[in-house]
Amino acid sequence: MTGKQELSAYRLTAMMLMGRIFAAMTYFPAGYEGPGTLMAGTLLSALFQGLLMIPAAVLYRRGGREVSRGAAALYLIYFCYEMFMDIGGYVYFSDFLFGGEVRRTAVLGALVLSALFLAAMDTAVLGKAAGTVLIGMAAALLIIGAGAARKAYWVNIDFAAADPAGAVLRAAAAETARCECLVLYAFLLPRTSLSRRNSPGRTAAGFLAAKAVVLETVFFLTAAVLGRYFYHTKLPVFSAASYSGGRVIQRFDGLFLLIWCAAAIVKLGVLGACARDCIMILRPSAERNRAAALALLPCAVGAAVPVLRYRWESVVYGEPAALVFAAVVILTAGVPAAVLAGRALRRRTVSKGVRA
């Protein structure tokens, strides 16, 4: 693995959570058939995702600290795809938040420059930044949730679907496809410094538990507050936040906007840093800042073409979910499992040679 920086278990967890929380706060992809099935599918996906994280944890315990060039190329493609989607999605959805008063080019430029600054940082420093932002985000979500609770109605949570079991399974698959944090776990774990108390398994379990609590709370409050509008609004969590308020501050949607922007920048910076490291694995002589720019800027240019021509909606709602799901499974579990299998095969070959 390029670089000698080490992450703590908390910083790794924070970097993983930031990405998933940002996606949950932005939009819910098409295909969810009800808040009840969505919440049940999210819990079910945690079990499946825990199984996917086992090979990476086993590889870490057996001394796996390197990423091959072939694996780095695969990770690089995935990280660039996620950056492309996040850049375009942020600029597109910002129109609904800023009311069209800010040009898309200005939003795009500010996001890319901020993320580029973070992507050039050491991974450990970036993890510390993610941990700090995560604390602020948790506090803000608690404030928004408390302000919206008085307008939440339990009756809006239902399991109405033609095929409830199938709807839950589809929701679980969709949740896994949106969880690039699993790929971050497999890629960043080798540089993480873990103690016996914070083993790879406990770190994964803690992340999955924290993610489930946050997502279930967000989904519940959003559906309970919005009711059937939950299915039609482009920014459901922001819409729910607009119902939140207190005696002094009437609405907390401005607070949502603050943490949403911070989460986007940190998430994009993390993805950019990971893509940068992939480039440095493929080309060890590459300079870090240039590698970060090489990873991030082409994705920004690629996203700028459809989003500035107001054609991004067909991209974000036409995402190939099955292909993304397969990529998450392969990069999270398949690559570490292949490394473990290759090591086992080499040991057998050596032992047979010694016996001969």
Image (cartoon, rainbow, N blue to C red):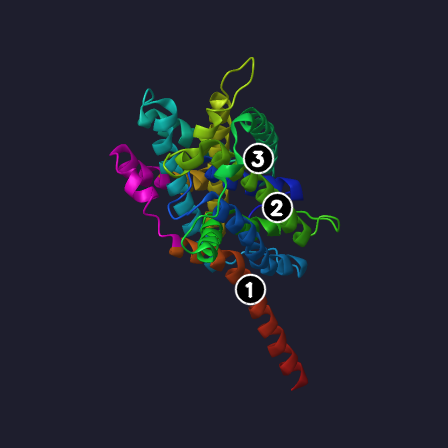
Residue 295 placed where, x, y %?
41, 42
Q: Name the element at disc 1.
A: helix
Query: Disc 2 designates what residue?
Result: 207
Residue farthest to the top, as pictured = 248
The first of marks 1 and 3 along the sequence is 3
Residue farthest to the front, as pictured = 155
Q: How many marks?
A: 3
Query: Disc 3 designates what residue?
Result: 130
Task: Report if the CB atoms under discs 3 and 2 are less than 8 Å apart.
Answer: no
Residue 90 placed where, x, y %?
39, 34
Query: Disc 1 designates what residue?
Result: 337
Query: What amino acid is found at the position of numbered circle 3 in the picture?
Result: Ala
Task: Report if the CB atoms under discs 1 and 2 are less than 8 Å apart.
Answer: no
Give the alpha-carbon distance from disc 1 to disc 2, as whole Å.
21 Å
Query: What amino acid is found at the position of numbered circle 1 in the picture?
Result: Ala
Q: Name the element at disc 3.
A: helix
Give the alpha-carbon distance from disc 3 to disc 2, as whole Å.
14 Å
On screen, residue 149 versus residue 86, left or right, reads right
Residue 64 placed where, x, y %?
62, 58
Q: Nearer the observer, disc 3 or disc 2? A: 2
Q: Nearer the viewer, residue 51 or 239?
A: 239
On screen, residue 15 versus residue 319, left or right, reads right
The first of marks 1 and 2 along the sequence is 2
Is 103 located above or below residue 247 in the figure? below
Is 65 located above or below residue 132 in the figure? below
Q: Name the element at disc 2.
A: helix
